[in-house]
Image (cartoon, coloured by chain):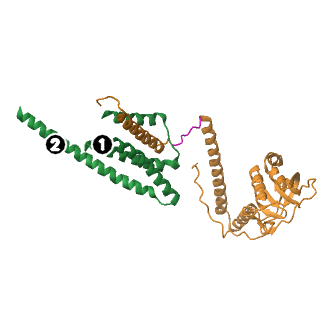
Amino acid sequence: MWLPALFLIIGLLLGFMTNMSIPDAYTNYLSIAVLAALDTLFGGIRAQLEAKFDQKVFISGFFFNVSLAAFLAFIGVQLGIDLYLAAIFAFGVRLFQNLAMIRRLLLEKYELYRKAKKVRNHNI
Amino acid sequence: MKNGFNKQHVAIGIVCLLIGLMIAILFNTNHQTIDRDTRDTWEIRTALLEEQKIQQNLYMEIAEAEQTLQEYQDQTEHQQIESLKNSIHELREQAGLTEKSGQGIIISLEPMFLEEDYQEYPEINAELLQLLINELNAAGAREMAVESQRVINITPIRDVNGNIYVNNSSIGELPTKIHVLTNDSEEIINHLEVSEIGDYFALENVTMNISEQSDIVLPEYDEQIDLQDVDIVDVPEEGES
């Protein structure tokens, strides 16, 4: 459970310490890729909470979503259509849905935990 | 986490690592430090000195204008007319509407014939002439004339059907003479010799002969100055760099 969080922090630290940056022209691609990655991450957390987590789906989803988002942005630039807005919209909506689901699941779990505690106390 | 680091955890960890890295890079890219002022004290002092010079010039201009104004106010009607006439004369001189003479240099652009079997008669183009005039201005020329055409602030130099037109009249074929009035002929000659302009002319098979003259007469600008198409350009305010 703590390993992914640890790796996330290591990644953040690595990025900040090396002070890496990319040319301005590619910021669009990276931002959309980050959004896709965050979407996958929250999707994974939700699936874990729903006990439906599948590693293959998670990893393939991550790489596929990120590259698809970047590709969409690329096509958009080539065609002169702001297609990356579509990707931002789609991922944004999904991100919020996932967050809402995670919140509900956590609340449900908390309720269950409280009930279980009450029952235990009652039994004692 | 029962088995410690199993394959599954490592794979998810790497994905998380990538996400973190991407976020950090994006953050770094969006929070680039703005260019810092890295000038040292000496450079800042030089810049300050330059600005002070500009300021002083402006003050001097203001003082001159105020003096003229004072003169207008203090004088009798007859004297007022006299000083107005003086001002007009000065302004006409500044605008290039009067003949002007003094020391300076004459640059003559002449065809350069190489020892080749066949060579076209060399021509220059308006851009080259503009370049030369810009160089002369940068080197400190006061007044200029191309052939018999006085160069003023709004003088157009352009190619019209293969001829170069200065002030809406052709300056003809080579050789062409450019008369330049200056206080320091030496400086302009040195400037022209070290600049690349000679090479540019040489590419067109044209040579530049520069001679110093103590008495040059520049013709007046003989057309109407038409400011109809002259617009005020956005000039950055003083002090803005």
Looking at the image, which residue is at 78% across and 55% down? Answer: B132
Spot the orange chain and give its letter: B
Amino acid tagged 1: Phe
Name the residue located 45 percent from the left edge and 37 percent from the top edge: A15
Mark number displayed over residue B98: none
User: Can you identify the residue that label 1 sits on?
Assistant: A53
Can you tell which of label 1 and label 2 is closer to the viewer? 1
Q: CA distance from mark 1 to mark 2?
A: 22 Å
Q: Point out residue B215 in the picture as x, y percentages from the top left corner.
A: 88, 55
The answer to whether any part of residue B142 appears in the image is no
Residue B223: % across, % down: 77, 70
Residue B208, given in percent of the width and then of the height, sits at 86, 53
Which region is colored magenta? B34-40
Given contact means CB atoms under 8 Å apart, are the residues at marks 1 and 2 in contact?
Answer: no
Left or right of residue A94: residue B23? right
Tell me the SS state at disc 1: loop
Asked if A5 appears above or below A104 in the picture, the reply is above
Q: Is residue B36 magenta?
A: yes
The residue tagged 2 is A111
Q: Is residue B75 magenta?
A: no
User: In the figure, what tint was chain A given?
Assistant: green
Residue B85: in sight, yes or no?
yes
Amino acid at dot 2:
Glu
- Left or right: B36 as drawn, with respect to B82: left
Please rate how many residues cluster around mark 2, counting C-alpha atoms within 10 Å: few if below 14, some from 14 to 19, many from 20.
Answer: few
The total number of labels drawn is 2
**Quarter residue B235 falls in:** bottom right
Q: Is residue B108 left or right of residue B96?
A: right
Marks 1 and 2 on same chain:
yes
* Mark 2 element type: helix
